[in-house]
Image: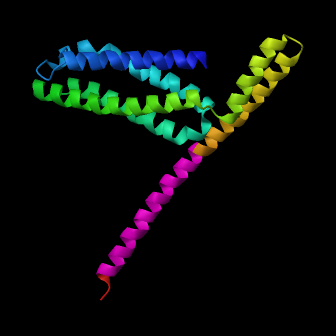
């Protein structure tokens, strides 16, 4: 949990630095796209990296939030990649800068929401994780009596179960998406049938 908190703190620091750049006018739409990337690129890449790392830890700490976590991380990574692509695509320079900066702004909203999920998981982890942390604390107090070894074995088993749970949640998310597509297709077919009926 300490490592997770440290990475979350790092992400918050990067976002604060970007906010300072915005409020002080370091990055403005009048800058050429190359300059925008020069000033913002490293921080954008850092956000992408930290978000992916936090996701892996978050899926263990709070596996029941897996679909939400996956959704936000995908939106953040896609949005920041689109920011870079917008800056370097062909076209009028200032227009690219304007669109790129706006794309980054939207991505930072998603980053802010993602950090809220991380903070919530930090203060209220999955009951299983909370119990493991409690057992570890007791093991430190009692000292090594075979207790730590048994706890480690239990932790490994729980990790396997949580991995299966994440896969199940991911599969359910995909199934829900497929069902939505099927419902949409059925509605289109019914609408077409009504239009063609005399």
**What kind of secondary structure does the magenta stretch mostly adopt?**
helix
Residue 6: x and y in percent read 52, 15
Residue under the point 21% across and 24% down? 87
The colour mode here is rainbow
* Furthest residue toward right: 145
Residue under the point 75% across and 26% down? 156
Q: 107 or 41: nearer the eye?
A: 107
- Classify the position of the C terminus by image quarter: bottom left
Query: Was residue 182 drawn as part of the magenta stretch in this picture?
Result: yes
Query: Was residue 35 drawn as part of the magenta stretch in this picture?
Result: no
Q: How many badges with numbers are in the image?
A: 0
* Furthest residue toward bottom: 198
Q: 61 or 143: nearer the eye?
A: 143
Residue under the point 68% across and 39% down? 164
- Quarter of image, res 2: top right
- Quarter of image, res 153: top right
Residue under the point 51% across and 29% down? 118
Residue 48: x and y in percent read 41, 23
Specify whether 164 is left or right of 57: right
Residue 158: x and y in percent read 74, 32
Range of residues picked out in magenta: 170-195
Residue 191: x and y in percent read 34, 74
Specify whether 194 is left or right of 163: left
């Amino acid at each position: 949990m300490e490592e997770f908190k440290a990475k979350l703190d790092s992400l918050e620091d990067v976002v604060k630095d970007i906010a300072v750049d915005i409020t002080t006018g370091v990055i403005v739409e009048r800058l050429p796209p190359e300059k925008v990337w020069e000033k913002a690129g490293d921080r954008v890449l850092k956000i992408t990296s930290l978000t992916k790392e936090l996701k892996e830890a978050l899926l263990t700490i709070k596996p029941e939030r897996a679909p939400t976590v996956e959704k936000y991380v995908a939106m953040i990574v896609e949005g920041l990649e689109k920011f870079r692509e917008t800056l370097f695509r062909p076209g009028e320079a200032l227009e690219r800068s304007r669109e790129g900066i706006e794309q980054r702004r939207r991505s930072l909203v998603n980053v802010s929401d993602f950090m809220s999920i991380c903070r919530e998981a930090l203060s209220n982890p999955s009951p299983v994780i909370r119990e493991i942390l409690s057992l570890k604390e007791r093991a430190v107090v009692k000292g090594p009596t075979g207790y730590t070894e048994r706890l480690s074995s239990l932790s490994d088993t729980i990790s396997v179960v949580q991995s299966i749970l994440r896969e199940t949640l991911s599969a359910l998310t995909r199934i829900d998406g497929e069902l939505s597509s099927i419902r949409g297709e059925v509605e289109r077919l019914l609408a077409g049938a009504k239009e063609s009926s005399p």
